[in-house]
């Protein structure tokens, strides 16, 4: 049985926030701060008007996906790391996008030479990760994501999964603490590939809690 890698996309495989910031600058006369933890609180209008509401912020995100996805660029070494890991593992890209964005995401990744199953999701990722693990026969599994809440969700629903916290945007990474429910924090794919391969080599489920 092959091990399984379940990997997020935005700020793990492809850069998003830097391009979202550029688009907000050009199209909406807004600033988007990358050094803040609160996504919705990071948006400001240059006119000095009231900050966008959460509903307005979601509308802006829906304007970026899929219409502006061509702006996105590949995270350094991500494609090479996935190619190496794919020689021994099954890989699923679990991305929090609406289903209508699935085909654009597949096409986007294909342009970067990444050809793996893409599954869209909304909300916490723990339940879909648990389902994927069962579907693949309960192999040794590694989950990679940039958001701490998804690591907490996976820890709850699939605690046997090894959890790697990665924030690939260098302007943002120094301002984001390691996810408490992840087993490791690595922001570079060369190091991450080695860490993931080591988990596959060990062939054991994750410890019950990080640091154990």
Image: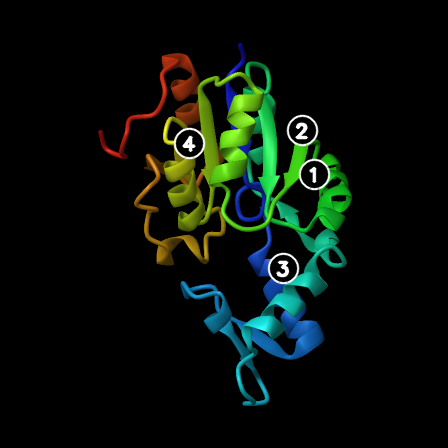
In this rendering, the answer to whether 96 lies above or below 154 is: below
> Please, what secondary structure does the residue beneath circle 1 have?
helix
Marks 4 and 2, the one that precedes in the sequence: 2
Q: CA distance from mark 4 to mark 1?
A: 27 Å
Question: Cα distance, mark 1 to mark 3?
Answer: 16 Å
Q: Is residue 175 left or right of residue 121?
A: left
In percent of width and height, residue 29 lies at 64, 79
Residue drawn at x 45%, y 28% is 142
Q: CA distance from mark 2 to mark 3?
A: 24 Å
Which residue: 37% across, 55% down? 176
In the picture, the disc for residue 116 is 2
Q: Are marks 4 and 3 in contact (CB under 8 Å)?
A: no
Q: Cβ–Cβ below 8 Å for labels 2 and 1?
A: yes
- Quadrant placement of the C terminus: top left
Indicate the position of residue 71 as horizontal and vertical percent values.
70, 55
Q: Earlier in the sequence, mark 4 or mark 3?
A: 3
On screen, 60 above or below 123?
below
- Please give the label number shown on residue 43: none
Q: Is residue 191 above or below residue 88?
A: below
Q: Residue furthest left?
A: 212
Q: Nearer the viewer, residue 190 or 12?
A: 12
Q: Earlier in the sequence, mark 2 or mark 1?
A: 1
Residue 19: mark in rendering: 3
Label 1 crowd bin: few (<14), some (14–19), many (20+), radius 10 Å: many
Q: Nearer the viewer, mark 4 or mark 1?
A: 4
Query: Label 1, on which residue?
Result: 109
Element under disc 3: helix
Which of pointers 1 and 3 lies earlier in the amino acid sequence?
3
């Amino acid at each position: 049985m092959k091990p399984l890698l379940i990997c997020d996309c935005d700020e793990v495989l492809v850069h998003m926030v830097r391009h979202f910031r550029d688009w907000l600058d050009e199209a909406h006369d807004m600033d988007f701060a990358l050094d803040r933890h609160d996504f919705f609180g990071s948006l400001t209008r240059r006119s000095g008007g009231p900050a966008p509401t959460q509903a307005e912020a979601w509308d802006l995100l829906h304007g970026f996906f899929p219409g502006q996805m061509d702006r996105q660029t590949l995270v350094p070494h991500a494609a090479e790391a996935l190619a190496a890991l794919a020689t021994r593992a099954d890989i699923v890209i679990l991305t929090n996008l609406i289903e209508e964005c699935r085909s654009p995401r597949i096409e986007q990744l294909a342009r970067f030479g990444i050809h793996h199953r893409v599954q869209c999701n909304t909300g916490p990722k723990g339940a879909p990760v648990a389902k994927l693990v069962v579907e693949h026969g309960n192999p040794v599994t590694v989950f990679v994501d940039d958001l701490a809440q998804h690591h907490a969700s996976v820890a709850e629903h699939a605690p046997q999964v090894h959890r790697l916290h990665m924030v690939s945007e260098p302007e943002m990474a120094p301002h984001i603490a390691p996810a408490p429910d992840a087993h490791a924090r690595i922001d570079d794919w060369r190091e991450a590939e080695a860490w993931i391969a080591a988990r596959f080599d060990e062939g054991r489920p994750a410890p019950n809690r990080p640091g154990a």
